[in-house]
Image (cartoon, rainbow, N blue to C red):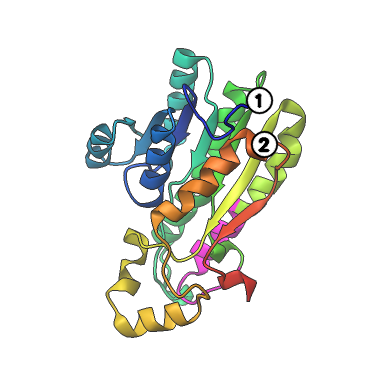
């Protein structure tokens, strides 16, 4: 019987693979035999990927030319990319009335424009053979949170973009699903982990009573990229310790 969770010789492209959730997902695919390409916006991130035995590439998803060029290069070399995982994201803890234009553009440019451009470039490169896309959104695309207005909007946009493209591209053999993490222990959540009172409040709202780990997202990403989810598209898979079940 074929192991649907084996990715031997599969080609996987993950944006923001140098740390946090992206790193954990990249290592999971690597350990299952995949050839993993990862992007980072800084040289340090690319260097870190080399130590992970991942093909690191410098690419800023806010640059309209970066991801299309990278995707074309990988497809030219391997004839395909079996799965694209759009993981790059940025946030800000800012009152809605205090947002500056450059901060709005930074978040939307990375979290929604960058995801759309990557999806579009992937579709164009693989239009005749189909493919799989996993977009990393957030539970803050489903529920609201103070000081996260633009981030919430961007991640809600990722969920809706995933649904729309799943329908539009289904006839071409593409599957798209969104992965929605809850509060995960990464660079983005350091402001919480360093404040005991805030952490107590956060944990009190999580039924499983702990922050998630980046590794908690790896199994879900493998599932969405694999043939085990071959009849699943346009869906949102939530990994949040039970927050949105309340």
Rate crowding at label 1 as few (under 14), some (14 to 19) or many (20 or more) other CA atoms within 10 Å: many
**Who's the residue at 57% across and 22% down the image?**
125
Check residue 65 in the rendering and tell me which mark sits there, or answer none: none
Q: Are marks 1 and 2 in contact (CB under 8 Å)?
A: yes
Q: Is residue 121 left or right of residue 210?
A: right
Query: In terms of secondary structure, where does tag 1 sit?
Result: loop
Comes first in the chain, label 1 or label 2:
1
238 or 209, which is in the foreground?
A: 209
Is residue 153 in the magenta section?
yes
Q: Position of residue 235 (x, y in %)?
A: 68, 50
Vertical comparison of 221 with 150: above or below: above
Q: Give the residue number, with chain letter if any, for mark 1.
A: 130
Vertical comparison of 113 with 153: above or below: above
Residue range corresponding to the magenta coloring:
143-158
**Who's the residue at 57% across and 42% down the image?**
223
Quarter in which the N terminus is drawn: top right
Rate crowding at label 2 as few (under 14), some (14 to 19) or many (20 or more) other CA atoms within 10 Å: many
Q: Position of residue 203 (x, y in %)?
A: 43, 78
Q: Give the residue number, with chain letter if any, for mark 2.
A: 175
37 or 62, which is in the foreground?
A: 37
**Between marks 1 and 2, how big is the CA–CA gap?**
8 Å
Vertical comparison of 72 with 235: above or below: above
Is residue 152 in the magenta section?
yes
**Who's the residue at 50% across and 47% down the image?**
219
The residue lying furthest to the front in this view is 1
Q: Position of residue 183 (x, y in %)?
A: 45, 66
**Who's the residue at 56% across and 51% down the image?**
179
- Magenta stretch mostly in which secondary structure? helix
Quarter in which the C terminus is drawn: bottom right
Query: In terms of secondary structure, where does tag 2 sit?
Result: strand
229 or 163, which is in the foreground?
A: 229
Q: Quadrant of residue 45?
A: top left
């Amino acid at each position: 019987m074929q192991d649907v969770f084996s990715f031997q010789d599969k080609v996987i492209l993950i944006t923001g693979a140098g740390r946090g959730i992206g790193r954990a997902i990249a290592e999971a695919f690597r350990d299952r035999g995949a050839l993993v390409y990862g992007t980072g916006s800084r040289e340090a991130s690319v260097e870190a990927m080399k130590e992970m035995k991942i093909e690191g590439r410098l690419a800023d998803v806010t640059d309209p030319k970066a991801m299309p060029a990278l995707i074309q290069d990988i497809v030219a070399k391997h004839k395909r990319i079996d799965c694209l995982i759009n993981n790059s994201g940025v946030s800000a803890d800012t009152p809605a009335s205090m947002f500056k234009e450059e901060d709005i553009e930074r978040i939307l440019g990375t979290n929604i424009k960058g995801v759309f451009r990557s999806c579009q470039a992937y579709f164009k490169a693989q239009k005749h053979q189909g493919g799989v896309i996993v977009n990393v959104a957030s539970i803050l695309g489903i529920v609201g949170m103070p000081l996260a207005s633009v981030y919430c909007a961007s991640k809600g946009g990722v969920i809706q973009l995933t649904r729309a493209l799943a329908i539009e591209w289904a006839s071409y053999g593409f599957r798209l699903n969104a992965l929605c993490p809850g509060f995960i222990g990464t660079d983005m959540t350091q402001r919480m982990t360093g404040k005991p009172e805030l952490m107590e409040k956060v944990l009190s709202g999580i039924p499983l009573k702990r922050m998630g780990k980046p590794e908690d997202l790896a199994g879900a990403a493998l599932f969405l990229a694999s043939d085990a989810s071959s009849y699943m598209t346009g869906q949102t898979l939530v990994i949040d310790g039970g927050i949105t079940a309340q």
